[in-house]
Image: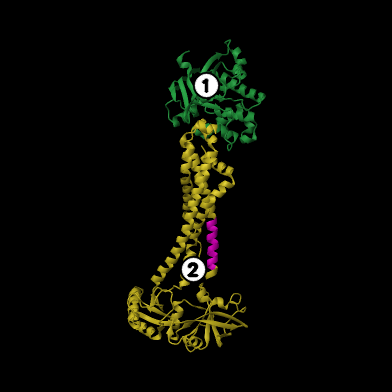
Amino acid sequence: MNYFLFALRNLKRKGIRSWLTLLGICIGIMAVVSLISLGNGLQSAVVSQFGLSSTEVITVQASGGSLGSEVVTPLTQDDVRAIDGLGTVEFAYAENSATISIDYNDRLIVTSAISISPDYDDEFYEINELERESGRLLKSGDSKKILVGNSLADGTSNGLEKEIITGKKLTIMGEEFTVTGILEKKGNFLVDGIVFMYESDLDSISTQGDDVDKIVVKVKDKDLVNKTKEDIERLLRSRRDVDVGSEDFSVTTPESSLAQINQILGAIQAFVIIIASISIVIGTVGIINTMTTSVLERRKEIGIMKSVGAKNSQIFSQFFIESGFLGLIGGGIGVLFGVILGYIGTILINNFIGAETAPMISFSLIFFSLLGSFLIGALAGIFPAMKAAKQNPVQALNS
Amino acid sequence: MKKEEVIIHLDNVSKFYHMGETIVKAVDGITLSVKKGDFVAVMGPSGSGKSTSMHLIGSLDVPTKGHIFLDGHDISLLHESDLAQIRGKNIGFIFQQFNLIPTLTVKENIMLPLSLQGMAEEEREEKVNALLKKMELVERADHFPNQISGGQQQRVAIARALANDPEVILADEPTGNLDTKTGEIVMEHLEKLHKEGKTIVMVTHSPELAKEYAQIVYWLKDGKIQKVTTKDSKSMKKVKDWKGD
């Protein structure tokens, strides 16, 4: 007999009750599908915020004695030279940053400036994958010259209400700077929204002195990254006179950054999966409830079916499939909205970080989501369907 | 009465229900036989046990005591799935409330017993179309039960009862929910089936119906057979005056 047609008719008959029952499964599946389809975008979003590019680059930063506290002992130019002297290190340079104000077009905005070491400017551009969109990059001998990030140059969004173009003069922290070039869009607002200048210029507008915010270390070979990390740690421990385990600095390798990214992604995924699981549990209970009520309401129908020759197994199948259908329709709607949400989310992320990721929507994702929701529905229907099958024909007919 | 002619035989059948501490004897030691091709009426007031006997004959229920034979086979000890098989193949039910499935069309309702038996679609179509024609329901085939009249619904129920071509038709107050004229039409259909050779067992509380159509009438009271009358016997006079107690 055509259980599917029968199931559809009964779901239709229940109207709004069917739809409400579907909601839990729908939300759960939607969460899972949108999370998975967002995966790519999410990963590149997080990666770009970490500024990960080269696999042979180690960064060293000073930190407080305990987590979250302020830097107590800053790194120094001497530390940079000491690290540069290690055998496995190709080069090391200091990278400082400062919060700056820009005065232009009679408006004032606050952003950041990052320093470029004049000895390693080409290496800096290479490691950070910076390229000019217009004008030129900084070259040795430049003074009071800056490079401007792509979005900072954009007059529609930089808050200055005027486009910054090559050759213009900006007032930064009260001093005049000339724009030598605009950088290509990187898709990372930490790069696109700031200015770059030589170390000496940043020193002149900040109180940096000999302190170094960050040391960027390029290792000779990527197989030497972990060894170099250990060497730097040993070196800095002795220079800063700290014991193993109480380091007031951190040495970050691409590998450890990636681990951190995965940790963040894992946390986001865990959160969504918890929400999805709760929705699915609620949805399952909802289906059990609806189907149990349905069995009670349709006792007479069960009696009729039995009187015309329906076996217990056939009654069971009817309710079981109907319940599975509830899950399947909920899952179907969930997949639809999940895919839509995945697309919207990807577009938002792409706009935000300027990346061009595509949502990951595969046939198998949709197939297994639908299969899963059918199984959840069917599983929820087992108990009510058994109850339906066991109805005494006479009592059912008389109800 | 030759034994091979008997299609239904109840041998000292009882059905007891527990209601708290008390035991209700719905049917209390009934013995009766129905021959192939008979038109039998079971009469009695409410609570006399006529509906319970009908459920027992129709294998919707199993007896507490005694044996029920259908076509020579003892069905009192069968499992539910075997009973379902018997209901589907050997018995056609007609109820007072018509008992059609509201979510199925007229055609699908008639087709239901065939589908449950796993009949192939082509064969099903053919059978159902013939039944629609026979019951003058062709134009109502795609209507739902709530879109047709009571008389038409009962005709659908008769068509459904005939679907698997059973030997026995069990009718429980088939005209109880119908006006006199519509009721007569339904009874004419039953009469026609009887003439075609079907065995018909009808439960009714109407002496007129019993008198007009049944060859044998079993009179029940308190779960026991009080008397048996036949169409030709003089005691049918009593049928007319009988008030149900």
Taking the spot 39% from the left edge, 71% from the top edge, the residue there is A256
Task: Find disc 1 in the rendering and name its residue.
Answer: B222
Q: Is residue A193 above or below residue B21?
A: below
Judging from the image, what is the letter of the chain drawn in yellow?
A: A
Label 2 element class: helix
Residue sitting farthest toward the front: B21
Q: Which residues are magenta?
A: A337-350
Q: CA distance from mark 1 to mark 2?
A: 83 Å
Quadrant containing the C terminus of chain A is: top right
Q: Is residue A288 above or below residue B213?
A: below
- Residue B180: where, in percent of width, then height? 66, 24
**The quadrant where residue A94 appears:** bottom left
State yes or no: discs 1 and 2 in contact (Cβ < 8 Å).
no
Amino acid carrying mark 2 in the image = Ala
Few, some or many residues within 10 Å of mark 2 (<14, 14–19, 20+) = many
Q: Is residue A348 magenta?
A: yes
Image check: A83 left or right of B172?
A: left
Taking the spot 46% from the left edge, 39% from the top edge, the residue there is A386
Q: Is residue B70 visible?
A: no
Q: Is residue A297 above or below residue A348?
A: above
Taking the spot 53% from the left edge, 26% from the top edge, the residue there is B92
Amino acid carrying mark 1 in the image = Asp
- Residue B184: where, in percent of width, then height? 64, 22
* Front-most of residues A72 and A187: A72
Q: Is residue A389 magenta?
A: no
* Front-most of residues A273 and B238: B238
Indicate the colour of chain B: green
For the residues carrying marks 1 and 2, which lies nearer the camera in this image? Answer: 1
Q: Chain of mark 1?
A: B
Task: Find disc 2 in the rendering and name its residue.
Answer: A45
- Residue A68: where, in percent of width, then height? 43, 74
Q: Is residue B155 above or below residue A50?
A: above
